[in-house]
Every structure is written in C-alpha cells, then in structure tokens.
Image (cartoon, rainbow, N blue to C red):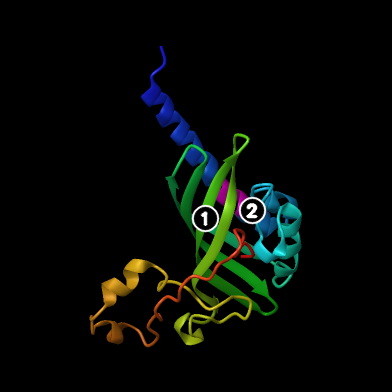
Amino acid sequence: MSDPALTERVERLEANLAIQQLAIRYALAVDARDLDAWTGCFRPDVNMGRHGTGRDALRRYIDPMVRRFYRSVHQVCGHRIELATEDTATGAVYCRAEHEVGDEWIVMAICYFDEYARVDGEWFFSRRRERHWYAADVTRTPQSEGFAGWAGSAEPALPAEFGSWARFWDGDARAAALTAAPAAPAAPAAPAGPAQGVSR
C-alpha cells in the first residue's frame, strides 16, 4: 500500500535535489564557457523580454557578455528553495564569483534570485536575476572601490534590495559609525525579462 504523505515527501526531496543541481550546472557552464549547457539550464521557451524568446535568444544575449572576462570561477555557497506548486518554485543562491579582466581579478559577492519551472518532468530556470553586494579587484577592499569597482557590473543592489535591511537600520545612529557608504534605499524593481542577470 502506498502512503500519500510519504510519496509527497519523496517528490519534494527529488524536486529540491533537481533544482539544487541547476545552480551548480549553471556555474560549471559559465566557467567552462559551455553555452549549450548554460542555455540548457533554462526552460526551452525562456522569455528574454525585448531580446526575444527561447534558448537561441538567450544564447545571443549571453555570448557577448561572457567575452568581457577571460577566466572565471563561480562558487555556489548556499541555496534556498521554496516549492510553490508541483511544477513551480522560487529560490535564492549565494555565490562568490571571480573574473579575470586583463590585469585585474574581480571578485563579486552575488545573490541570484530565481524562478524555476518543471517542464515535461525536468526542472529549469524560468528567470534568474543577479544582484550583488560588491565588485572589486581582489587587491582592493570593496569599500575603497565604492562597492562597484568593475565596469562590467551594474550598481550593487544589495543589501538595500532586502526589504528587511532598511527596517533593521531605520533610526539606528550606530550605522554611521560602521560604514562610510550606507546602502541607498532600494529603487522600485524595473520590469525585466526572466533571464535578466544571467551573465555573471
């Protein structure tokens, strides 16, 4: 006799394991510059917004972006997954990424905010947004670079994009003694295609 509760638990474990593999498959594909494996982490009909739909559109988008740095190392540090339905989930992945850009070795502290979907029994990214705390050459402190020491990265969105951040420090004068560069309040999120931020 089958136990429905046990079956559900096993299915949730299998979903979590499959989704966790996406994060490391993505990191390996970026560092190996295996664009087929990279695009294969995303659902076949991935929506790239104004860039088009599908894996070919994703490939056209990412190819020039990864030609801005030579060697790279993406180290996955942790992964939170929240299953929404049998076929959808969200998650956040911590990552330390290193990039060779000429004479510089750029280090980034990243959090990817993900949406996942199961298509024909297999889990894929539906959307992956890269947000980071800093980008700086390894010989410099993030503070000395204003937390944005690489032209290849956008302005850091973290930690201000965490809703709890501003609430935690609101009215606490001690923050001024701890940093000369307080995180600016998060701007409203702009609409973006599901694959935004897949370049790092």
- The numbered mark at residue 28 is 2
* Residue at screen point 41% across, 72% down: 159
**18 in relation to 101, above or below:** above
**136 in relation to 196, above or below:** below
Query: Considering depth in this image, is 60 or 49 the residue closer to the camera?
Result: 49
Quarter holding residue 9: top left
Question: What residue range appears in magenta?
Answer: 21-26
Q: Position of residue 78 (x, y in %)?
A: 45, 54
The reply, left or right, for residue 90 in relation to residue 51 is: left
Residue labelled with disc 1: 114
* Residue at screen point 35% across, 84% down: 179
User: Badge 2, how many Cα within 10 Å: few under 14, some, many 20+?
Assistant: some
Q: Secondary structure at mark 1?
A: strand
The reply, left or right, for residue 35 in relation to residue 79 is: right
Nearer the observer, disc 2 or disc 1? 1
Query: Considering depth in this image, is 52 or 12 the residue closer to the camera?
Result: 52
* Residue at screen point 48% across, 86% down: 144
Instruction: Name the image quarter holding the C terminus.
Output: bottom right
Q: Amino acid at mark 1?
A: Asp
Q: Amino acid at mark 2?
A: Leu
Query: Considering depth in this image, is 191 or 118 the residue closer to the camera?
Result: 191
